[in-house]
């Protein structure tokens, strides 16, 4: 527990330091932007109905953050309450009833990564992280929705994903990319996205592996104004004996803009990861 708390409080210091030093100057839309539904007291009503795009589909647009645990607020005295950031960033299977269905070699690899406290984690060395870690990362992300594409802009190193919703098929035998190739379609009020062609990476801070054979299916749902639910199914037969599914819950951030953050700028930590 001491090692776990140390890792998380280190991340918290970085996040808070960045938030304090890199804010936009005051602007009228900060606080409660126009168009945000309000309750009778004039406060933001995050339980208000889901906003809709011109197509009638849910509008996923907004700046989103990860709460510390799936049950928000975290239950008093729970292990999640000790963590200042999303628990699934540390362990993607945090809320799963069964352990990850790791292939034998993948279990050996993860155990070795845990034993060395994740010193080889790409995020710790300012290298690109994978799609799953981008969903659970403590830094916020902005979703921009158009009729033919959903773009996710991540404050983490200013990276982005393009999710095409114009009906194009996934490529065959694609050149691997860090975030792969994503094609989505609406099934009722759920945006279903399939992603392939990703480079080998980590699923979480503790080193659950992901190989280039992985296929990720994401189901985006916005049940009301203030909340976003992502159901992630990871199908990676090289690293896991069967597909598994986790749910990531995010909440909207009002009056917040993304700003530049580059992990590699003035980076001084990697030399100490021995």
Image: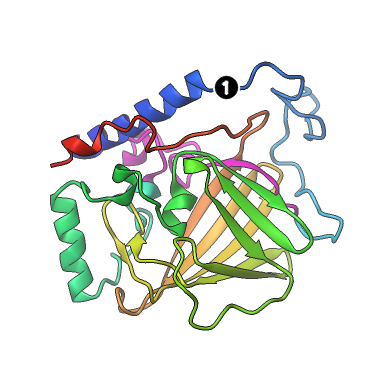
Residue drawn at the location 84% of the way across and 60% of the way down: 56
Residue 18 visible in this rendered orientation of the protein: yes
Q: Is residue 45 left or right of residue 215?
A: right
In depth, the one of 19 and 247 nearer the eye is 19
Residue 1 visible in this rendered orientation of the protein: no
Q: Is residue 27 left or right of residue 135?
A: right
Quickly name the residue at label 1: 23
Does residue 236 sit above or below 111 in this rendering?
Answer: below
Residue placed furthest toward the bottom: 172
Q: Residues within 10 Å of mark 1 (few under 14, many from 20)?
A: few
Residue placed furthest toward the top: 26
How far across and down, in percent of the image, does residue 202 sit? Answer: 33, 58
Residue drawn at the location 70% of the way across and 23% of the way down: 30
Q: Is residue 67 left or right of residue 62?
A: left
Determine if the magenta segment contains residue 21.
Answer: no
Q: Quadrant of the C terminus?
A: top left
Location of residue 214 by image quarter: bottom left
How far across and down, in percent of the image, does residue 108 sit? Answer: 15, 66
Total number of numbered discs in the rendering? 1
How far across and down, in percent of the image, does residue 208 sit? Answer: 29, 60
Determine if the magenta segment contains residue 66.
Answer: yes
The magenta-colored residue range is 59-87
How far across and down, in percent of the image, does residue 187 sit? Answer: 70, 71
Residue drawn at the location 76% of the way across and 29% of the way down: 33
């Amino acid at each position: 527990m001491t090692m776990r708390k140390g890792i998380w409080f280190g991340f918290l210091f970085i996040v808070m330091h960045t938030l304090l030093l890199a804010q936009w100057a005051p602007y009228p839309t900060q606080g409660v932007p126009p168009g945000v539904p309000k309750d009778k007291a004039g406060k933001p009503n995050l339980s208000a109905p889901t906003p809709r795009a011109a197509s009638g589909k849910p509008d996923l647009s907004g700046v989103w953050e990860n709460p510390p645990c799936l049950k928000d607020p975290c239950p008093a005295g729970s292990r999640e309450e000790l963590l200042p950031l999303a628990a699934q960033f540390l362990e993607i299977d945090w809320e799963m009833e069964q352990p990850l269905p790791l292939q034998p070699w993948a279990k050996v690899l993860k155990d070795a990564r845990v034993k060395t406290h994740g010193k080889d984690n790409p995020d710790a060395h300012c290298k690109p992280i994978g799609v799953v870690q981008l969903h659970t990362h403590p830094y916020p992300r902005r979703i921009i929705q158009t009729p033919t594409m959903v773009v996710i802009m991540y404050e983490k190193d200013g990276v982005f994903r393009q999710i095409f919703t114009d009906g194009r098929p996934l490529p065959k035998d694609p050149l691997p990319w860090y975030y792969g190739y994503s094609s989505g379609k609406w099934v009722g009020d759920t945006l279903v996205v399939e992603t392939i062609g990703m480079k080998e990476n980590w699923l979480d801070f503790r080193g659950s592996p992901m190989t280039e054979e992985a296929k990720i299916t994401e189901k985006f749902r916005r049940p009301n104004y203030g909340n976003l639910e992502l159901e992630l199914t990871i199908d990676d037969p090289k690293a896991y004996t069967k597909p598994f599914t986790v749910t990531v819950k995010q909440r909207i951030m009002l009056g917040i803009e993304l700003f530049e953050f580059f992990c590699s700028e003035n980076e001084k930590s990697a030399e100490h990861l021995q």
